[in-house]
């Protein structure tokens, strides 16, 4: 018997495939497949989470007042122009819900983050993929795809799974060329890991224009992906519209408490950044030494390119030794693997494993 039919577009969605969390026959594999923080999370965040336990019978603060004030203060933003979500993924979903209708389109990079097509197709809108020469977003390629039905341009900067980034001047050039009714979403999930003088995170663009939303997450630098919490900053009119569509208690009480504590833990943030800054260049250099090309990443992971057909073999080889890395086949990059920066011993073990794999 046939069940009720979902609305148009739902069966066009390819279900999201998360990074592997288990390896057959291995008890506690080391997960370097989901861009999580190898240091865990801030002890202050854990304490705040535990302190929230006696209050689980209460609804969370629907306005996220305390966290809103903390984010506004830390980044110098107007509190009323912030919105909080169950992960930044929920903010993308709210944007798509609020602004996309069947027949509209949203543009992203050829290898863009996998949540963008899901939320776009759910609205019956078309996903347009702009070519990414050299695996990096290209403003002219994006602009070629804009037409009168374009409502959103999704830009993850740096991007996942490439780790590539667009300099501030290119983001501003893109914004200047977009019609004012198109929302430019600047997804800064990995923003904190970028230390480039030419990089701009879009705060100023979001502050001064009516059609830009910048998003950030507590899942990467702060190490809280299990709690699902992120935020967005945009024009008053967009945030007001999103607030109307937002489920009233979308961010849980422990998530609000832990995120606020994490935001205040500068020491944990500094240690997390230092880990990436120390081991990212090392991994890039070592992978290069094994003859692999590596996309120049500015995120907490690297993307290594393997000889044709060998990436999935290497993934299985590492998994058998207890190290999980991410296949990027679902991103259209079947000959690459994405490796999250780990602790020293784990980074070294992955390189040793790959050296053995290649017989070096
Ligand atoms: C580019 C990018 N944006 C956003 C997210 C989602 O973050 P969140 O956990 O806040 O939903 C991810 C997670 O992997 C990501 O890679």
Image (cartoon, rainbow, N blue to C red):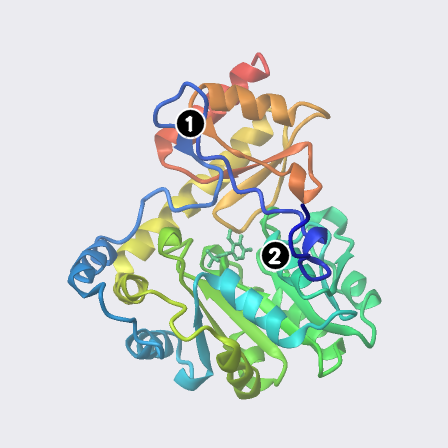
Secondary structure of the residue carrying tag 2 is loop
Give percent across and percent down for residue 38: 36, 42
Along the line of sight, the residue nearer the viewer: 12 or 154: 12
* Image position, residue 193 (x, y; %): 46, 55
Q: Are marks 2 and 1 in contact (CB under 8 Å)?
A: no
Name the residue located 56 percent from the left edge and 66 percent from the top edge. Answer: 92
How much space separates mark 2 and mark 1, taking CA atoms? 26 Å
Reply above or below: 303 against 170. above
Dot 1 crowding, Cα within 10 Å, few <14, some 14–19, many 20+: some
Question: Assess mark 1: CB under 8 A from ligand 1?
Answer: no
Task: Tell me what residue is drawn at x 40 percent, y 52 percent.
Answer: 225
Quarter of the image with the N terminus in it: top right
Looking at the image, the residue that sits furthest to the top is: 359
Task: Tell me the residue that label 2 is attached to.
Answer: 165
Displayed quadrant of residue 85: bottom left
Residue 323 horizontal/vertical position (percent): 45, 27
The answer to whether 181 appears left or right of 140 in the picture is: left
Taking 279 as reference, is 90 above or below it?
Answer: below
Q: Residues within 10 Å of mark 2 (few under 14, many from 20)?
A: many
Q: Nearer the viewer, residue 337 or 204?
A: 337
Image quadrant where residue 95 sits:
bottom right
**Location of mark 1 (residue):** 348
Under tag 1, what secondary structure?
Answer: helix
Q: Is residue 55 left or right of residue 157?
A: left
């Amino acid at each position: 018997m046939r069940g009720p039919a979902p609305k148009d577009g739902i069966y066009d969605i390819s279900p999201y495939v998360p990074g592997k969390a288990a390896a057959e026959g291995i008890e506690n594999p080391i997960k370097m497949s989901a861009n999580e923080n190898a240091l865990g999370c801030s002890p202050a965040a854990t304490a705040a989470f535990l302190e929230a336990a006696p209050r689980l019978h209460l609804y969370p603060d629907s306005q996220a007042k305390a966290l809103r004030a903390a984010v506004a203060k830390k980044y110098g933003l107007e509190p009323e122009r912030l919105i909080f979500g169950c992960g930044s993924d929920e903010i993308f979903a709210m944007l798509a819900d609020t602004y996309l209708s069947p027949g509209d389109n949203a543009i992203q990079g050829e290898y863009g983050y996998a949540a963008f097509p899901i939320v776009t197709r759910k609205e019956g809108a078309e996903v347009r993929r702009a070519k990414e020469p050299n695996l990096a977003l290209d403003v002219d390629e994006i602009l070629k795809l804009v037409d009168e039905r374009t409502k959103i341009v999704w830009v993850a900067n740096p991007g996942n799974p490439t780790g590539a980034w667009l300099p501030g001047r290119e983001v501003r050039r893109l914004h200047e060329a977009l019609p004012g009714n198109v929302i430019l979403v600047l997804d800064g999930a990995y923003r904190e890991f970028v230390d480039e003088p030419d990089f701009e995170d879009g705060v100023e663009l979001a502050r001064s224009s009516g059609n830009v939303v910048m998003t950030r997450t507590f899942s990467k630098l702060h190490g809280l992906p299990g709690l699902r919490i992120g935020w967005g900053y945009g024009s008053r009119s967009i945030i007001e519209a999103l607030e109307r569509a937002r489920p009233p208690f979308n961010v849980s009480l422990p998530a609000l408490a832990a995120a606020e504590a994490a935001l205040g833990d500068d020491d944990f943030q500094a240690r997390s950044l230092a880990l990436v800054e120390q081991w990212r260049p090392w991994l890039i250099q070592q992978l290069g030494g094994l003859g692999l090309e590596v996309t120049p990443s500015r995120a907490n992971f690297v993307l290594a390119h393997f000889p044709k057909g060998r990436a999935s073999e290497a993934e299985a080889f590492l998994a058998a030794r207890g190290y999980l890395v991410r296949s990027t086949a679902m991103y259209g990059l079947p000959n690459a693997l994405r490796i999250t920066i780990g602790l020293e011993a784990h980074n070294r073990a992955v390189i040793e494993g790959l050296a053995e794999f290649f017989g070096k």
